[in-house]
Image (spheres, rainbow, N blue to C red):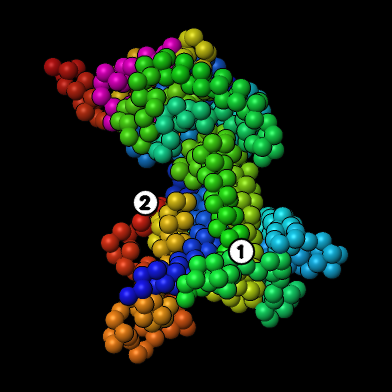
Amino acid sequence: MDLLNALVALTNYVMIPAVAYGSQLALGALGVTMIYAVLRFSNFAHGDTMAFGTMVTILVTWWMQSMGINLGPLPTALLALPFGILGCMALLLFTDRVVYRFYREQKAKPVIFVMVSLGVMFMMNGLVRFIIGPGDQRFSDGERFIVSARDFKAMTGLREGLAFKTSQGITIITAVVVVAALFWFLNRTRTGKSMRAYSDNEDLALLSGINPERVVMYTWMIVAGLATIAGVLYGLDKSFKPFTYFQLLLPIFAAAIVGGLGNPIGAIAGGFVIAFSEVSITYAWKKILRYLMPENLEPDGLVQLLSTDYKFAVSFVILLIVLLFKPTGLFKGKSV
Amino acid sequence: MIVVEDVHKHFGGFHAVDGATLEIAKGSITGLIGPNGAGKTTLFNVIAGVLPPTSGRVKMDGEDITGLPPHTLFHKGLLRTFQIAHEFSSMTCRENLMMVPGGQSGETLWNTWFGRKRIADEERALRAKADEVMEFLTIEHISDLKAGQISGGQKKLLELGRTMMVDAKIVFLDEVGAGVNRTLLYTIADAIKRLNEERGYTFVVIEHDMEFIGRLCDPVICMAEGKVLAQGTLDEIKANEQVIEAYLGTGLKNKDKLEAGA
């Protein structure tokens, strides 16, 4: 029995990656949930919106790197992030103007919006690949670790190392700041309140003098911010590849639905539920069990419940289980 | 004040409003009665900009307002309430009222970050106004409750309160008395009367309760099958053959006949 080493291994391989991944999912799910609450449809283009925002950020990052601009130990991408957000806002406002507004004026049914967003998804998908290509892009620079495994071992004398990547630290801090700002905005400002009012009762909001186009515009702008931040954090943590971002749509939607579509707190909770289950089910527990079990009981196999190839299945199993018991999600979401 | 000229509203082959023409005088409390399906609510929706008319015009103070969106009409002082009370259920009653005046300075992103002081001043004034409105309607005790939790009658009063948050010129009330007990109905009627007299609001009221109409409204307009049948005082309407046929029921006529025969 070696509890301390087991705990360090658990933190290193499960807790920290899951918290970072959960924060990224939560930010993505917040975007999906905002669109659902205010515009009342499931936006399938969200994964590719994230890809677009990240792409702009990467291009600006590369330009900054070539100009020798950097943030020292922090990744240059943080400096490029505002440009990515602006680019993404421009794209979303443009799609809203030329595509979604038409259907809004027709008072189209939500299912039509969903199909429309599917078309937008393919367009954005193509756009991103056209500009940056379908391949893997790395754009992280600066210090790679806050605490590296070797330093940790030297510091504590334990056999297990604990690595805390800069990207993970940044992810967690950014997520906390962004979520706090978003909730402050939604609950304390007049604009946020109008958005909530519009989401609660559209007819009444119109008859209270709230301008719907303005609410819709702010929603897209906030969603652009959330999507770009989530995308860049994910890209820094892993790497940027358009197809991966498209696939991220699955856990993001699972997170938003598990938490209760249309409920921001639910989106955050859902993000972490999905991330923790995904990471812990696809992790090979052999290493940790070795510390916890008597030597002769040490498992032969990897004790990995599911291969990482199936990780997206995990989110959907969780989704099914939660919806069986709570049809509107963990926190009460909207149902259409 | 409001002139409706030959308004048609068709839903596919169904003619919900079929050539309605009427005029609403400034400062009046006009009652709109008629059987279910007469097109009263649809006409309200057309006037309030919720539905565009198939043909015809709506004018307000001589200005053509046909097909303008509801939030624009709101800023012109034209307000409406719903047959089934609407509310922002997750906000308190006070916040519901404070939502109302559109175009507040807190609505622009710039002010959200850089105009804190101006917003704070504005909100303080709004808050005072909301409290005053709730006192007027004698519902100050529910101001901090979530609007989703209050009773149906209180929601109706809250709807009325919403119209008081801005300087409304004309307010359309859709079955304000539906599902409300008599005492509360009198409170509502009282509030309407006071608003009309003290603040000069013009009201148009859809209602099925004849006592309520009689107490409050002059003139009364009767609609049936999408057309305006008659207009006049309640007594005149009650005596109108066509109205009796379409709405009040032949029972009344038969009774008269019986009385005459006896």
- Subunit of label 2: A
Q: Nearer the viewer, residue A249 or A229?
A: A229
Residue A107, visible in the rendered structure: no
Numbered-mark total: 2
Residue B191, visible in the rendered structure: yes
- Magenta part of the protein: which range? B174-194
Tell me which residue sits at (66%, 37%) in the image. B113
Up-down relation of residue A158 to residue B119 (above or below): below
User: Residue B3, image x and y in percent?
Assistant: 57, 27
Closer mark to the observer between disc 1 and disc 2:
1
Residue at mark 1: A146
Residue type at mark 1 is: Ile
- Kindly indicate the quadrant of the structure image that contains residue B40: top left
Q: Which mark is residue A332?
A: 2
Using a 10 Å C-alpha cutoff, classify the residue at mark 2 as few (fewer than 14 neighbours), some (14 to 19) or many (20 or more): some
Up-down relation of residue B160 to residue A35 (above or below): above
Q: How far is the residue under mark 1 from the one under mark 2?
A: 38 Å
| Residue B193 falls within the magenta-colored stretch | yes
Up-down relation of residue A209 to residue A275 (above or below): above
Callout 1: SS: strand
Tell me which residue sits at (46%, 42%) in the image. A201
User: Residue A241, image x and y in percent?
Assistant: 64, 76
Residue type at mark 2 is: Lys
Same chain letter for marks 1 and 2 = yes
Residue furthest to the right: A67
Quadrant that contains the N terminus of chain A: bottom left
Does the residue at mark 1 contact the one at mark 2 (Cβ under 8 Å)? no
Q: Nearer the viewer, residue A101 or A234?
A: A234
Using a 10 Å C-alpha cutoff, classify the residue at mark 1 as few (fewer than 14 neighbours), some (14 to 19) or many (20 or more): some
